[in-house]
């Protein structure tokens, strides 16, 4: 793709990990579409990146609204005709204080709408554009809390029993990652999930390391060479067990 600027879309990119992923990709020379539900939030974040001399434009996209997702895909089709990187970063967590036996099912459905169904909706809409890239990359933002290996048992290293909706939605997202990777095997497109670790964002109530550090995993997966892996969950130190 010599002489042609690469295009990346990051959902939920107006703050936290998403903003830092957008920044990281822009530093690598991408034109980054700053996906956000609110137009003002997206415009403000894109402007902040442009103030740093980076190429960024806002893109309104609500991953829980199929019409919004289709409109975003149409805009990409009309303006650029392809997409090189898709980072599914938009995510929510509700019901953080409830044990599994007390979880609110309506809240759980809301979490799945964003963290699972929203990701599938966006991938399906953007896949025709990604197929036009010589090296399409899909990165789904997951977590070590989605690992059955790391969370099984009360003494497991990442056993948090009050995050049923979030943890299980990200486990489902890992399965979604594998299924799309299987479908796209043999094509230039690679599909992986990223574990950024605990980062200080609104989702974590400010606990953890700087989002700029967590963003490195997603940016690395977006930049994988042709011989890189697909269908896995990766953190900074390598593969994370399922």
Image (cartoon, helix red, strand yellow):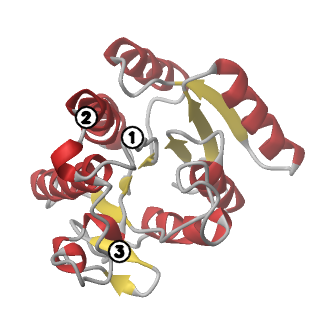
Q: Camera-side residue: 31 or 155?
A: 155
> In which quadrant of the rendered image does the C terminus lie?
bottom left
Residue 184 left/right relative to 60:
left
Residue drawn at (59%, 42%), measured in percent from left and top? 13
Q: Position of residue 190 (x, y in %)?
A: 29, 60
Q: Which residue is mark 1?
A: 94
Q: How many marks?
A: 3
Give me the residue at 10% from left, 58% from top: 182
In this rendering, does residue 3 appear at all? no
Q: Position of residue 231 (x, y in %)?
A: 21, 65
User: Mark 1 or 2 closer to N-term?
Assistant: 1
Asked if residue 79 lies left or right of residue 232, the reply is right
Q: Residues within 10 Å of mark 2 (few under 14, many from 20)?
A: some
Where disc 3 sits, the SS reads: strand
Q: Residues within 10 Å of mark 1 (few under 14, many from 20)?
A: some
From the image, tell me which residue sits under label 3.
234
The image shows residue 141 at horizontal and vertical percentages of: 40, 56
Q: Is residue 226 above or below residue 62?
A: below
- Report if the CB atoms under discs 1 and 2 are less than 8 Å apart: yes
Q: Is residue 237 left or right of residue 128?
A: right
Q: Which residue is mark 2?
A: 104
């Amino acid at each position: 793709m010599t002489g042609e600027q690469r295009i990346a879309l990051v959902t939920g990119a107006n703050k936290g990990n998403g903003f830092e992923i957008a920044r990281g990709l822009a530093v690598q020379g991408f034109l980054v579409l700053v996906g956000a539900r609110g137009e003002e939030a997206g415009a403000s974040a894109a402007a902040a990146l442009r103030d740093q001399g980076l190429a960024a434009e806002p893109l309104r996209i609500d991953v829980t609204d199929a019409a919004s997702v289709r409109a975003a895909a149409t805009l990409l089709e009309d303006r650029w005709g392809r997409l090189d990187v898709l980072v599914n970063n938009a995510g929510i967590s509700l019901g953080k204080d409830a044990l599994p036996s007390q979880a609110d099912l309506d809240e759980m459905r809301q979490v799945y709408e964003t963290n699972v169904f929203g990701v599938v909706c966006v991938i399906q809409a953007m896949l025709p554009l990604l197929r036009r890239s010589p090296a399409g990359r899909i990165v789904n933002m997951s977590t070590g809390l989605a690992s059955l290996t790391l969370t099984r048992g009360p003494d497991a290293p990442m056993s948090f029993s009050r995050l049923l909706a979030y943890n299980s939605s990200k486990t489902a997202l890992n399965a979604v990652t594998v299924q799309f990777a299987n479908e796209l095997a043999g094509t230039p497109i690679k599909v992986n999930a990223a574990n950024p670790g605990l980062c200080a964002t609104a989702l974590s109530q400010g606990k953890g390391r700087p989002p700029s550090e967590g963003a490195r995993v997603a940016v690395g997966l977006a930049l994988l060479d042709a011989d890189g892996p697909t269908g896995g969950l990766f953190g900074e130190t390598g593969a994370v067990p399922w």
